[in-house]
Structure formats: C-alpha cells, structure tokens
Image (spheres, rainbow, N blue to C red):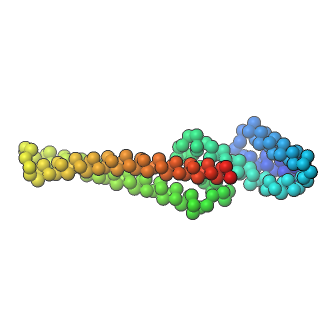
Amino acid sequence: MKKEEYLIQLGEGLVGFSPEVKGDIVSDIREHFDMRIQEGMEEEEISERLGDPKKLAKQFEVSTKIEKAKDTKKGRDISAAILSAAGTGMLSFFGVVIPSIIGYALFVVLVLASVSVMAGGVALLVFAIVNAPGFALNFNSILMLLSVGCTALGLLMVIGSIGIFKLIKKGILGTLEHIRKH
C-alpha cells in the first residue's frame, strides 16, 4: 500500500481522538515513512512492516486507554483498557482478563464476608446487652466477648480485602503497562 493511502486509512481508524492528536499521530507515521524511504525502503514494504493501518489505529487507542488507567487508577478506566486491549488481541484472554474477573469477584466476596462477620458480631453484642442484667461471667458475657471478636475480625477482613484489591489493581496496571510497551 502506498504511503498516502496508508495515512488516510490510519486517520480514518483514529476514531475518538481529537483532531490535534489525530494529526500528531498521522504526522509521526508520515515522518516514519519519510525516514524509511530515505533509507531506501519502498512505500509498500514500509506499510507492510507497520501492519494494517486500522490495527495500528486500534493500538494507539489501547495505548491511550492504558495511560489513562495508569494515571487515574480508577476501576472503570482499568476495565476499559483491559477490554480495549483484549479487542486487539494484544493480551491473552486467559492471562489477564480471566484473572482480572476472578480478582474482582474475590474482592466482592471478601467484602461481603467481612460485612457479614461484622454484622453478626454487632447483632451478638446487641443481643447480649439486651439480655444481660449485669456483667458476670455467664453466657451473655461470653456472647459479648464473641461479638466484639467477630466485629474486630470483620473489620480486619475489610481492611485485608481493600489491600488485596489494591494488589490486584497494581498487578493489572503493571500487565497493561507491559503490553503498552511491547
């Protein structure tokens, strides 16, 4: 494919970019063509090495989304980057997407379990207080100690869940950055 035809198709594939960014990308690829032509390469050979212009445009989109996910670290942006990269075949479905889904599901399960343990602890505490006439070593005081323990355990589980979620997010961002660089 000739240089101008390639650049037109590339520009058409750069949907969602501002005109300035689109112009910069096309200009960079034009410059790449010019440098390779000066080295003695043919336009067709250069376009063949660059690959399909629509796929190249998609790779620019993926790279932009990965950069945004790195900057914001928001789950929405990370998910958009994963789905965008998966759409180009740049990342293995089984290597990143499935572990990401499992990681998010694990986080949700841990948070739900943590909240359940805390709620159970609070319920036990309320039950023990309502039914305890005084504080003596009896069934109600054992329930109170158990409820405080459950509440504390639930709180620790919530903190642990948040820590696990941050590690998962960091791992996903690291994988996406690796993909963007290669």
In the picture shown, does residue 13 fall above or below 71? below
Left of 2 or right of it: where is 96?
A: left
| Residue 65 visible, this angle | yes
Q: In this figure, what is the number of numbered marks?
A: 0
Residue 170 on image: x %, y %: 52, 48
Q: Residue at x 77, y 42 (%)?
A: 25
Q: Residue at x 70, y 44 (%)?
A: 16
In the displayed orientation, state which residue is furthest to the top: 20
Q: Residue at x 22, y 47 (%)?
A: 148
Residue 50 on image: x %, y %: 80, 53
Left of 54 or right of it: where is 175?
A: left
Viewer-proximal residue among 150 and 175: 175
Quadrant of the drawing holding the N terminus: bottom right
Residue 40 on image: x %, y %: 92, 51
Left of 107 or right of it: where is 176?
A: right
| Residue 115 visible, this angle | no
Residue 73 on image: x %, y %: 54, 43
Q: Residue at x 53, y 43 (%)?
A: 74
Viewer-proximal residue among 159 and 25: 159
In the displayed orientation, state which residue is furthest to the bottom: 94
